[in-house]
Amino acid sequence: MKGASVPVALFVLLAFLSCSREPDRKIPPSVVADGKSAFAIVDGLSLWKASGGNLVTSQAIPIGEKLSLTGQSDRFVQAGKERDFMQVKRESGAEGWVRADFVVSRAILGVIVTDNAVIYSVPHNTAATTETIPVMTVVAIHADTGGMRFIRVTCYDETAKAILRGVYLRNEGVSSSPDDVQGAILLKLAAASKSTRQQKAFLTSAIKDHPTSIFMPQLTAALAALTGTPAPQASPTPDAPAAPPPPAPQDSAPPAAAPGSPAPAAPSN
């Protein structure tokens, strides 16, 4: 497919974020995290409450959600290891602690739009590795990125169940369009849900609210499979990435989990 790329204007914005000053222009809040905010880069990120020196999980945060940083940090023993945590506040007002290595500040949210984007060890054409990042992976593009041809990203590798921190990708394989990012997130949430009603809500929201998403063919196909109606005849994008298997309807599904609830194999976060 034609690989979208991070617009030049956003490189200017990244330069602003790398400084202490705030950008002069208005930026959609779902796109940019400055030094006082951060993106969750793991789906189902646990929001913890501190109780008597111990952590008790209270909520699950979906990937890509923007969190306000309170400026407080601490170390807690979790899963038998002492780890760094940051105190955050959600848009809903809920406060708690999250794993510091599972959030990224001073970044722009992006998504992989090409099949198996090659990872580079440094921002140079001769530094290609044998490792790749799959299409539809949500990434945080760092403010101190590599330049116009390369960007530095952090993301969660669902296959390896590990964080890929500060790796380099070629710019043209990543899109920072909010429609592309949110389309991918909602498509994944629908595929992970066991509730037909919730699946339909995710897909319908993506189609109506993010009409220019590069993943529109996959979204409309998944909704058509769910409702049993023909998918709209959209103009196909050359070499478009294959959509994940459409969610199977379940008329007697159990109550839906909270959006972004961690899968059984998710990391201990």
Image: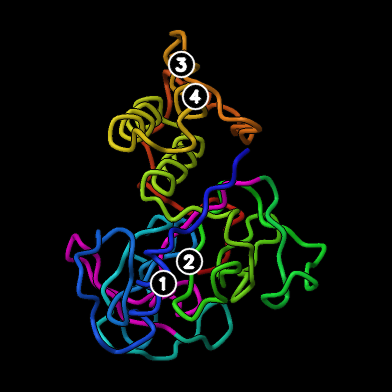
Label 1: which residue? 107
Q: Residue at x 56, y 69 (%)?
A: 151
Q: Does dot 4 land on a helix, a strand or a loop? A: helix
Q: Amino acid at mark 3?
A: Ala
Q: Is residue 204 left or right of residue 236?
A: left
Badge 3: few (under 14), some or many (20 or more) residues near its Cα, within 10 Å?
some
User: How many marks do you count on the picture?
Assistant: 4
Determine whether 250 is above or below 210 in the image.
above
Q: Residue at x 67, y 75 (%)?
A: 123
**Mark closest to the chain's N terminus, 1 or 4:** 1
Question: Callout 2, which amino acid?
Answer: Ala
Q: Which stretch did the figure color magenta? A: 85-114
Decide: marks 4, 3 in contact (CB < 8 A)? yes
User: Cα distance, mark 3 to mark 1?
Assistant: 35 Å
The disc at residue 222 is 4
Circle nearer the N terminus (2, 1):
1
- From this viewpoint, which residue is outermost toward the top? 229
For marks 3 and 1, give the one nearer the viewer: 1
Q: Position of residue 240 (x, y in %)?
A: 61, 33
Quick check: marks 2 and 1 in contact, CB under 8 Å? yes
The image's mark for residue 140 is 2
Task: Give the spatial CA distance, label 3 vs label 2.
Answer: 31 Å
